[in-house]
Amino acid sequence: MAKRALRAGIDLGGTKIQAIVVDERHAVLGQARLPTPTAGGPDAVVRDLAASVRAACADAGAGLADLRGVGLGSPGSIDEAQGTVGGARNLPQWPGKPVPVARELAEALAVDAPVRVANDVDVATNAEFVLGAAADYASLLGVFWGTGVGGGLVLDGKPWNGRESAGEIGHMVVVRDGRRCPCGRRGCMEAYAGRAAMEARARHLHDDKRRKTVLFDIMRERGRDRLTSGIWFRAADRGDGLAVELLEEAVGAIAAATASAVNLLDPEAVVIGGGLGIRFGEPWVQKIREAMQPNLFRDDDPPAIELAALGDLGGALGAALLVA
Ligand SMILES: [Zn+2]
């Protein structure tokens, strides 16, 4: 059989590894999802990245030999030219020095095709810009509402990384001397809107302040050890007061930071994605739009504010674009 021109894309997250196999037209032919290993460091992560690609290929009815390239979106500090991942605090037992993940993954797969790695938020932003909700626009602010809140920028059709770390919308200050952020600073948007920070807040209010909530009951029912997007969604759906209060606080923080960024950059589009963003969907994007409105300098002509169109495959589609 002739070799097929397929590509693999992998989205490496703090909780899951999502791999896909796509064809020349970016159609998803196969996919696989594995939990991110919680121990074992880079060796375990690379092993499971390779396993996810093999499983996605099998799902697509293809072989590794059909792959023209493998792209990886990873958290941490990425050197694209070297193919290394360093300083990834969401990954298990990651060492201080950069890990040559691209080379190790190529060896684990034994593929004769390029393996490229880039920042996870950048690839997800690029996917929405090229294939998704911002495909008709020339500039984009991507806001990825998940465990943290990541941001990506495309200005005049080109990714904007600043000196390296532009787009950290989660660390825009929304309350001076405000709540402690997982990054260690105070008053960041993520301290109010990130899933991890919201969970810490919910635990504090439940355990120490005796606030009633079904959040932890749902977590136990579902056999989870953390408050996933799905658990927040179910609790809100049941009208849980604490969950709704924290979610609305998150919306307020996202709206304040995003409106400020829009006032500064005036992009044509804002795309809201991430685990919580995708899970809560358009009704909550509408809440963000409404909450942004009073803070928009140009309030008579706001940018398009859209839900991410590629859903939770956006990161993997963007990773596959690295080798398009
Ligand atoms: Zn922060």
Image (spheres, grey):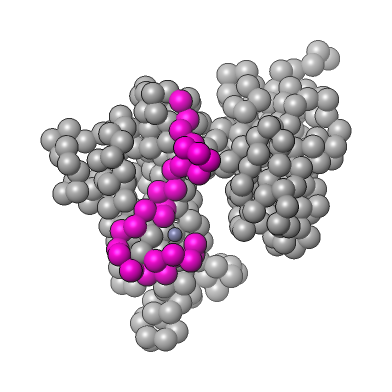
Note whether 180 is above or below 230 in the view shown: below
Q: Main secondary structure of the magenta part?
A: loop
Q: In the displayed structure, does residue 203 sit left or right of residue 24?
A: left
Q: Quadrant of residue 323?
A: top right
Q: Is residue 177 magenta?
A: yes
Residue 290 visible here = no
Note whether 216 is above or below 134 in the view shown: below
**Residue at (86% x, 33% y) in the render:** 110
Q: Quadrant of residue 132?
A: top left
Q: In the displayed structure, does residue 230 sit left or right of residue 174?
A: right
Toward the left, the furthest residue is 300
Residue 227 at x, y = what percent?
Answer: 50, 66
Ligand 1, what quadrant? Answer: bottom left
> Which region is colored magenta?
158-186
**Residue at (71% x, 18% y) in the render:** 5
Query: Depth check: 292 or 30 in front?
Result: 292
Q: Quadrant of residue 222?
A: bottom right
Residue 232 at x, y = what percent?
Answer: 43, 63
Q: Quadrant of the C terminus?
A: top right
Query: Depth check: 304 or 225 in front?
Result: 304
Q: Quadrant of the N terminus?
A: top right
**Residue at (56% x, 32% y) in the render:** 318
Residue 262 at x, y = what percent?
Answer: 28, 40
Residue 14 at x, y = what percent?
Answer: 61, 55
Q: Is residue 88 magenta?
A: no
Toward the top, the furthest residue is 2
Q: In the displayed structure, does residue 161 sit left or right of residue 6?
A: left
